[in-house]
């Protein structure tokens, strides 16, 4: 339930079309051919047909406080480095031939699910970057606090990404996601 509430907040914050998300994050899309090996009803047991990889990273900025003040102040800035979506170029499932309309609908559904991962990452990044600056009495205490915030942020990113996949069953139940994350399920109905 908590994950669903976090995702609801994400859908409000991360607006725009799927194409807008791809453009503003300079997402590279790599297309590969996919063959679904088993086709008994639908691919509910198969692996996810798309994949998104991130360089979720952070940098610290810390400076001695001005004249008359002691200690260090600064922040931890989170960013998305290279983002790559691996997407099927063509999908063929054994025993039924290739049906262009159905596979194109499936490809669009897979892309939408993967763009959802980028939306989740954007929302986590933006929330983490909105946190107040850090202050510490000395350089070493500041470094330790910044590293702790960075590691906590990375843990939060991993948690939200997993919660998104859990909620949507890796896209197979995409219709259950809230707001702009909701969409067509990523299942192959072979019959």
Image: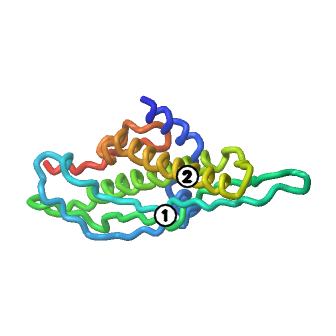
Report the residue at 49% width, 46% height from top. 156
User: Can residue 16 be seen in the rendering of this structure?
Assistant: no
Q: Nearer the viewer, residue 153 or 142?
A: 142
Q: According to the image, label 2 marks what residue?
A: 122
| Residue position marked by numbered label 1 in the rendering | 55
Specify few, some or many for label 2: CA neighbours under 10 Å numbering under 14, 14-19, or 20 or more. Answer: many
* Residue name at image x 46 percent, y 69 percent: 28
**Element at label 1:** loop
In screen coordinates, is 13 left or right of 49? right
SS for dot 2: helix
Residue 61 picture location, percent across and down: 70, 60
Location of residue 137 with respect to 175 vertically, above or below:
below
Q: Is residue 186 left or right of residue 112?
A: left
Give the answer, above or below, for where 75 lies relative to 90. Answer: above
Report the side of 75 relative to 190 (left or right).
Answer: right
Q: Nearer the viewer, residue 13 or 96?
A: 13
- Say how the picture is coloured: rainbow
Q: For this view, does 61 lie left or right of residue 53?
A: right
- For label 1, the crowd category at 10 Å Cα-Cα, with few meaning under 14, some 14 to 19 and many 20 or more, is few
Rendering coords of residue 109 (x, y %): 36, 52
Q: Residue 112, position in %: x, y?
A: 41, 52
Residue positioned 13% across, 48% down in the render: 191
Disc 1 versus disc 2: distance between alpha carbons? 12 Å
């Amino acid at each position: 339930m908590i994950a669903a509430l976090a995702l609801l907040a994400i859908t409000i914050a991360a607006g725009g079309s799927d194409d807008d998300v791809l453009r503003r994050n300079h997402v590279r899309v790599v297309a590969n051919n996919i063959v679904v090996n088993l086709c008994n009803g639908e691919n509910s047991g198969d692996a996810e047909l798309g994949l998104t990889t991130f360089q979720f990273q952070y940098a610290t900025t810390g400076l001695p406080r001005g004249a008359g003040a002691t200690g260090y102040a600064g922040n931890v800035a989170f960013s998305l480095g290279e983002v790559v979506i691996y997407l099927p170029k063509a999908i063929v499932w054994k025993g039924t031939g290739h049906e262009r309309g159905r596979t194109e609908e499936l490809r669009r559904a897979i892309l939408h699910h993967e763009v959802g991962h980028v939306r989740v990452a954007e929302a986590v990044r933006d929330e983490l970057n909105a946190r107040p600056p850090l202050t510490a009495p000395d350089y070493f205490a500041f470094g330790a606090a910044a590293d702790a915030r960075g590691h906590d942020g990375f843990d939060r990113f991993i948690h939200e990404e997993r919660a998104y996949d859990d909620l949507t069953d890796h896209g197979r139940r995409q219709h259950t996601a809230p707001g702009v994350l909701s969409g067509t399920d990523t299942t192959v109905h072979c019959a």
